[in-house]
Image: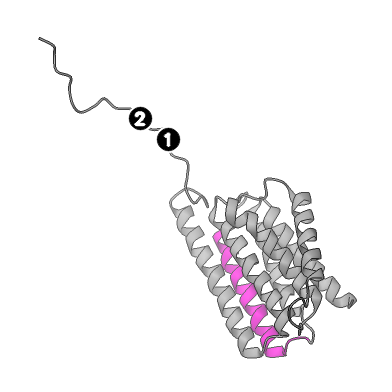
């Protein structure tokens, strides 16, 4: 096992755990950006300079747009209902499955640690996507899922070429921008990041038809 790649994989997963469990919106965004920034380095051989630069710019741009959407103090997001220890266990279990299944069915061209991290990110994204009730949390889950899928692609197909890296960077920046636009729109409506704000209970009204007096 390459110690450098192991450290990068750990940083990717730790950032994803913070992104999926933090209730402070900006803390979650910082964890997401950290995970996205380290992901391009989880390859063997390392990606070319142009591809790395594009991925880093795309990750920073996506994080910056989300950061703007979460401006202000005390802005909250859903976070994990089970807490970060449960998220760590989920990520560890998924990473073990990904690492042990590397190369099953076809000869891999990338490192097993990339597949382990990809499985961990995909597992962490499931609760955010399935149970998220606010735009930032669901958007974070979608970006983690996309990043995990890209890591699995790197593990199976090898290091992406520069043009592919540029396309990936554009996709991540566009996804982050879309989530940021929706988040800003929701805050403009006064509902913070909620997808479906709680509505007051229904008011019962009398029927329109009046009863006929018995004669």
Q: Which residues lie in the magenta part?
A: 46-70
Q: Is residue 40 above or below residue 141?
A: below
Q: Is residue 71 visible to the viewer in this orientation of the structure?
A: no
Q: Nearer the viewer, residue 71 or 134?
A: 134
- Check residue 46 in the rendering and tell me which mark sits there, or answer none: none
> Could you tell me which residue is drawn at 35 percent across and 30 percent down?
203
Magenta span: helix, strand or loop, mainly?
helix
Q: Is residue 165 visible to the viewer in this orientation of the structure?
A: yes
Look at mark 2 in the image and give the residue it sits on.
203
> Could you tell me which residue is drawn at 62 percent across and 70 percent down?
146
Whole-percent x, y for residue 46 in the image: 77, 86
Q: Secondary structure at mark 1?
A: loop
Q: Nearer the viewer, residue 46 or 105?
A: 105
| Dot 1 crowding, Cα within 10 Å, few <14, some 14–19, many 20+ | few
Q: Assign the C terminus to one quadrant of the image.
A: top left
> Could you tell me which residue is drawn at 14 percent across and 18 percent down?
212
Q: Is residue 38 above or below residue 52?
A: above
- Check residue 200 in the rendering and tell me which mark sits there, or answer none: 1
Q: Nearer the viewer, residue 127 or 196?
A: 127
Q: Give yes or no for residue 214 being in the magenta stretch.
A: no
């Amino acid at each position: 096992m390459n110690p450098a790649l192991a450290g990068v994989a750990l940083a990717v997963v730790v950032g994803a755990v913070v992104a999926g469990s933090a209730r402070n919106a900006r803390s979650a965004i910082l964890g997401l950006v950290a995970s996205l920034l380290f992901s391009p380095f989880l390859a063997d051989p390392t990606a070319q300079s142009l591809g790395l630069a594009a991925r880093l710019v795309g990750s920073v741009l996506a994080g910056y747009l989300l950061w703007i959407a979460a401006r202000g103090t005390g802005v909250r997001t859903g976070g994990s209902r089970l807490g970060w220890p449960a998220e760590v266990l989920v990520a560890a279990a998924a990473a073990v499955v990904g690492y042990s299944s590397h190369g099953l069915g076809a000869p891999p061209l990338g490192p097993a640690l990339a597949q382990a991290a990809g499985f961990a990110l995909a597992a962490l994204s499931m609760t955010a996507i399935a149970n998220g009730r606010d735009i930032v949390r669901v958007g974070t889950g979608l970006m983690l899922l996309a990043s995990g899928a890209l890591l699995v692609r790197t593990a199976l197909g090898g290091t992406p070429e520069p043009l592919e890296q540029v396309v990936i960077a554009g996709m991540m920046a566009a996804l982050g921008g879309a989530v940021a636009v929706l988040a800003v729109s929701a805050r403009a409506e006064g509902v913070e990041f909620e997808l479906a704000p709680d509505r007051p209970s229904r008011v019962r009204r009398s029927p329109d038809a009046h009863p006929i007096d018995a004669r």
